[in-house]
Image (cartoon, helix red, strand yellow):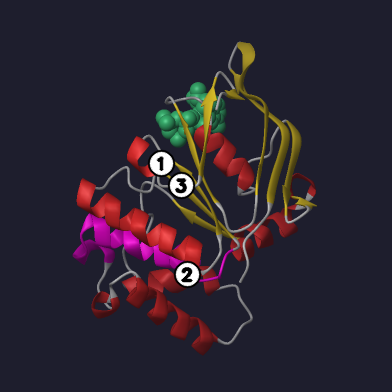
Amino acid sequence: MSGADINVVNCCKSFPVAQSDPVAVLKGVSFDLLAGHSLAITGASGSGKSTLLQILGAMEYPGSGEVFVNGRDITRLDQGARAEFRNREVGFIFQSHYLLPQLSALDNVLVPTWNSRRESDQHLARAHELLKRVGLESLARRLPGQLSGGERQRVAVARALIMEPALILADEPTGALDRTNSESLMDLLLEINSIERATLVLVTHSPFCAERMEREISLLDGVIVK
Ligand SMILES: Nc1ncnc2c1ncn2[C@@H]1O[C@H](COP(=O)(O)OP(=O)(O)OP(=O)(O)O)[C@@H](O)[C@H]1O
Ligand SMILES: [Mg+2]
């Protein structure tokens, strides 16, 4: 696997507001990130960090502007190609783990493979390998309800990696964790960034997490201020 080169060009996004003018959240955001590198997105609550991350992951359309991932403008893909891009090239990690409660840790890791034509034993082998990498091999058969918060978030990381994404997008992945679990989750994300060469974009409120990334951009009033 190799990482994704990202070029965001003059990205704007507004949200409609009932009986009022739309609110401009992103007002011309541009940045580049080379494949395999890591970037923190910081800024106050409401500054548009999650919106930008969702645009990068083709979960939202920008109002205007372009988002090139390995040279392809993802804002111009049709619905099917967008879904394929999200599933094949992006690994998402959120503040909440969104694991399916009725499935074991192992089966949760395998969820993104459900639509895939690849051999299922290859996926199974990778799922086991990933659970081992996140230190949960012995807990593979447990349900999410039988895991701690930190362990659940590690399952979510393994799930994000199962399709060997070129781009990992993490939205405050340590937001619900204590300091020890936060630090080990950050170690894990950086290890994956360096071993798998996946490009890593991390939204965080934590200066400790931000400074562990190679670069940081900070949003204020819809633009990048650093
Ligand atoms: N679907 C939506 N419809 C309308 N407004 C929205 C929508 N999504 C986000 N917003 C608004 O856009 C602004 C930016 O939201 P966003 O979630 O990107 O902020 P954020 O920087 O991630 O904040 P936080 O740190 O609190 O997670 C906020 O004012 C929010 O209310
Ligand atoms: Mg957010």
Q: Main secondary structure of the magenta part?
A: helix
Q: At numbered mark 1, what does the secondary structure look like: helix, strand or loop?
A: loop
Mark yes or no: residue 100 visible: no
Question: SS of the residue at dot 2?
Answer: helix
The amino acid type of the residue labelled 2 equals Val
Q: Earlier in the sequence, mark 2 or mark 3?
A: 2
Toward which corner of the image does residue 103 lie, by quadrant? bottom left
Q: What type is the residue that disc 1 sits on?
A: Glu
Q: Badge 2: few (under 14), some or many (20 or more) residues near its Cα, within 10 Å?
A: some
Residue at (33, 47) in percent of width and height: 174
Q: Which residue is mark 2?
A: 111
- Mark 1 closeness class: few <14, some 14–19, many ≥20 residues within 10 Å: few
| Residue ID for mark 1 | 211
Can see residue 180?
yes
Q: Which segment is the magenta one?
A: 144-165
In the rendered image, the vertical position of residue 206 relative to residue 139, given as above or below: above
Quadrant of the image where one finds ligand 2: top left
Residue 145 is covered by the magenta coloring? yes
Read off the residue under disc 3. 213
Nearer to us of marks 1 and 2 is 1
Residue 62's place in the image compared with 197, above or below, is above
